[in-house]
Image: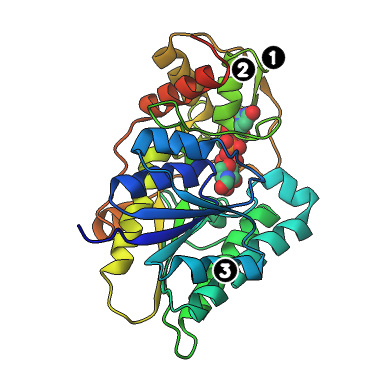
Amino acid sequence: MSKSKKILVTGGAGFIGSHTVVELNQAGYEAVIIDNFSNSEKGVIEQIEKITGIAPKIYEGDCNDIQLMQNIFDQEGLFAGVIHFAAYKAVGESVEKPLDYYHNNLNSLLILLRTMENFKVSNLVFSSSCTVYGEPDLLPVTEESPKKQAESPYGNTKAISEEILEDTVKGKNSNLKAVALRYFNPIGAHPSSLIGELPLGVPNNLVPFITQTAAGLRERLTVFGDDYNTPDGTCIRDYIHVVDLAKAHVKAFEYLENQGNDSFFDLFNVGTGKGNSVLEAIKTFEQVNGLKLNYTIGQRRSGDVEKVFAKVDKSEKLLNWKAELSLDQALKDAWGWQKKLSNIK
Ligand code: WQD
């Protein structure tokens, strides 16, 4: 049995990172995690082991720590590549603390790229976001759709990071091969209910707020506006099951491995290709889980785009990947995870 290829997963204890580590293990890769647990819990490692039977090696620390990054690459020997999740990701918080976001998200990427260069590791999958599209003029958005002024410093760090990668691969003697995956709205949890989303404090995102309301942790959900130019007046998003999103990372890594040795950068939309409104998400949650959600219609949230969902032909064709799980399944898995967290039978 040839030794499994080793992949460094930064932020691998987080929501999308942990689900990706599971899919990497199940595809035969060895995942090594670096995580500072600023937005994740150590217990997730044990849960990953329960799912895959493999306890991923983990380094507790920060990608901004140059010495630690050198030590990891030194100690682990040649990585087949890196999947880079580690970043701050709360849109609202980024508006309050822009410098923290620019420093953390950009500096950690620069340190990672320099370390990869020093250790001749060339394959990088980067976690980007559909937020770079802003309010699209045309829908569904393709990878060629124009990038718009980001709605937040968080979104801007993703747009700038993509430019850093694009320029780095064009540098003299660069051997970097990088793909940026532009996530749409990741939701749900692993069907085992052993891993899922762990929002710190009051959730910003819709689905964890829905599940916490259903669990009685929140009084009610406020729908941020029903006066948009959409069929039911509420915003439309492309909600993708986190397990499908995780699988896209494995496919993206295999795509990189199958390219030649020339440096290159490419980017891919990772969504379902379908748009659903906030009210549709609420109604679906109620139907698939057989419960009534307490919600009210409130004011619009500033910074929200009205409608965004993906064209995913490029990912289907080049990554040989397509989302397979439905909104129903994602909302059922999200509720299964919340019930586990809240000890609800
Ligand atoms: C979805 C819809 C809200 C909460 C953000 C980031 C994106 C990515 C995912 C990190 C919107 C509505 C929400 C609530 C509501 N983050 N909503 N009541 O804003 O599309 O995307 O999170 O990578 O980069 O921009 O996701 O879940 O916050 O909102 O009505 O209590 O749900 O107005 O229409 P969003 P979201």
The one of 43 and 256 positioned closer to us in this rendering:
43
Q: Secondary structure at mark 3?
A: helix
Tell me whether circle 1 and circle 3 mark residues in contact (CB < 8 Å).
no
Q: Earlier in the sequence, mark 3 or mark 2?
A: 3
For mark 1, does the 10 Å Cα neighbourhood hold few (<14), some (14 to 19), or many (20 or more) residues? few
Q: Residue at x 49, y 30 (%)?
A: 277
Q: Amino acid at mark 2?
A: Thr
Tell me whether circle 2 and circle 1 mark residues in contact (CB < 8 Å).
yes
Is residue 281 among what the camera can see? yes
Q: For mark 3, what is the residue?
A: 71
Q: For mark 2, what is the residue?
A: 213
Q: Amino acid at mark 3?
A: Asn
Name above or below for residue 217 compared with residue 253: above
Circle number at residue 27:
none
The image's colouring method is rainbow
Examine the image and state in which quarter residue 77 appears.
bottom left
Q: Residue at x 51, y 25 (%)?
A: 232
Q: Within 8 Å: ligand 1 and the Cβ of disc 2?
A: no
Which of pointers 1 and 3 indicates the residue nearer the eye? 3
Q: Within 8 Å: ligand 1 and the Cβ of disc 3?
A: no
Residue 107 coordinates in the image, percent (x, y): 66, 68
Q: Secondary structure at mark 2?
A: helix
Residue 96 placement, left or right of 76: right
Is residue 241 among what the camera can see? no
Residue 334 placement, left or right of 51: right
For mark 2, does the 10 Å Cα neighbourhood hold few (<14), some (14 to 19), or many (20 or more) residues? some
